[in-house]
Amino acid sequence: MNRIDWIMSGIGRWIPWSGALVLAMGSVSSLVGSGVESDPEELEALVISGSRLDGLAVQQAHRVFGGVQDPLTLLRGEDWLSFVPGAYIEGYRSSVGSDRIYLRGGEPNAALCLVDGIKVDNPTDGTGSSFSMASMPSLGVDRVDISYGSGSSVHGSGALSGVISIESFGDLDDPESWMSGGFGMHGAWEAQLRGGGDGDWGSGAVHYRQADGGRFFESTRQESRRVSVAYDPDVADGHDLRIRGFWADHESSGFPDDSGGPLFAVLRDPENQEGEESGLSVRYALQIDETGGVLHVQGSHYRRTDGITSPGVVPGVRDPIGLPESTVDSEFFRWVASAWYEQPLRYGLRVLAGTEWEREEGDSASMVDYGFFQSAGRYDLDRDTHSVFAEANGEWNRWVAQWGVRWNDASGAGDEWLHRVGLSMDLPEVNSRARLHYGEGFKLPGFYALGNPLVGNPELVPEQSESWQASWDVFVHVADIIATVGVFRNDYSGMIDFDAGPPPQLVNRGSVRIEGVEVNADWQASGAIRVRVFGIWLDMDPGVGEAPLRGRPDQRYGLDLDGWLGEHWRWGARVTHTGKRFDSSIPTGDRDLGSYERIDLRLSWIPSEEVEFAMVLENVADRKYEEMVGFRGLGFAPWFTARIRF
């Protein structure tokens, strides 16, 4: 063990429990009385991302507001994350036909995703529980919160590298109505419609989106529909109730993973996928007394079905056996219910304690055709997780401290203690703020990872993670600049990753360390021009004797300009650099994919408050690159769209 690892190990032993001092102080002060008064009209059902208490001041996080980031030039749901420093989307705008999200170099299944409080990770996906933004609305999303680092003390299983929390509607007090449509090359198009209203019954809204990704590449297509609904009943003061739900379906075709894609695949028949998903969340808050005590009760339900027909992959350089033809049909259910009590105390403290129950059920039926015989398989999943948790948050002058602990007990996997602690200090003398954060995470193996007939592994054990983060925020008020420089380290043990074999299989890696530096700056250069820059540099150590981690770049950085020409024209330009990536396929073996740059331009004409037209020119230099081995990135592609408000 080197000196840095020895120091990190020591920190990891004492830091989690140091925050207990904050909770102890709060308990003592509560005996005297909180001294805090609350306005029942300001009560809101909580939106949880990095904490059940306000945690963005302590954690390294990125928040994207719909009111700021909702120009008509957003084409797909993935665009919400395309300029977030620590997020990289593989397959985005390429012949892959789907997308996978990496947070700070972690596996796609290491990021927990929530939509309106619903866990929407896809446990039947090939990456073992990743989430795709492909079916999300490109317009109208209220906000997206990205909280970096291990967050299982708040969310339980799944939050290894971070949490992505998407709020589709936000406040419905003044719901808006509009419709939009767009089209591009090769038959790509999209249509969206949003309507809302309010009355004595409360307020509500509905959003419909349908999209066809076109036929940019051979055998690649992606079609989807999505309906999202929101209802906030009119309730008495001291109560808040919010109901959200969605239904979506999708159909897609593309070359299988590891096939070598359009450039190298021997079999030219596509892999076909179809399925649907639905979710419902209910979030309720009740003010108990005038001291500000609030009882929160939340519940959600998620269902997903998938059918996959794959032609397989013939033997090649990496694998002399290849992958046989197969079909898989799966169905998955998840129920989550939680309740907690939050109390403000004296000395700037807030504390809470609560409990959560999660139920997962699923089954999968498969047929694998080896040519000379067929093998039928079936896998059933039935898992319950019970948790209790506590959090504390304190604010004293320039200091903010945060602590959390959670005990999880999952059937078949045993129990787990999870901690996190954070500290923030404002430095007004130099217009800046310093932040430190430590967190622990764990993740139960996903449904696909356990039961897939080709690469699944029923012997997989839960993944573990620890994360350390430090950042420095600088505020230059005279020039209207906000900048952040951060460093981080994520240690994973038992990370589930794909082993090329033969035979190819998902396995637990021994240990993986990912370190990095991240910068982000936002400058309102003038009343009409906004300048944003970001950058991230990663050092990834997969462990002794292990292959490099696939798919994620060692660096990314970019520049975005957004401005106005007069009163009715809005323009923008974006330049991004994506560094080298390691990847592999059966026909080619291991390959290093080169770095590349992309330039995208956008222009909007807004003749009135009700009407907007836009044009986007993607990859104007027609840069040639591969997202994965044999899967080409999108070449030059124009897009035209319009929106009418009513």
Image (spheres, rainbow, N blue to C red):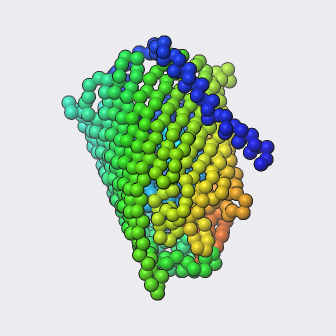
Image location of residue 58, percent across then percent down: 58, 32
Please name whichever residue, 523 or 463, is drawn nearer the observer in this view of the structure: 463
Tell which residue pokes out farthest to the left in this image.
Answer: 200
User: Residue at point 41% right, 32% down?
Assistant: 340
Please name whichever residue, 3 or 120, is drawn nearer the observer in this view of the structure: 3
Q: Is residue 477 above or below residue 3?
A: above
Q: Is residue 553 above or below residue 142?
A: below
User: Residue at point 67% right, 20% down?
Assistant: 429
User: Residue at point 65% right, 34% down?
Assistant: 15
Q: Is residue 393 visible?
A: yes
How many numbered discs sit on the rendered protein? 0
Q: Is residue 464 above or below residue 268?
A: above
Q: Is residue 68 visible?
A: no
Tell which residue pokes out farthest to the right in this image.
Answer: 3
Image location of residue 49, percent across then percent down: 48, 39
Image location of residue 588, percent across then percent down: 62, 75
Q: Quadrant of residue 466?
A: top right
Image location of residue 380, percent across then percent down: 40, 62
Q: Is residue 196 above or below residue 341?
A: below
- Quadrant that contains the C terminus: top left
Q: Quadrant of residue 367?
A: bottom left
Q: Is residue 9 left or right of residue 325?
A: right
Q: Quadrant of residue 167?
A: top left
Please name whichever residue, 616 or 45, is drawn nearer the observer in this view of the structure: 45
User: Residue at point 39% right, 49% down?
Assistant: 359
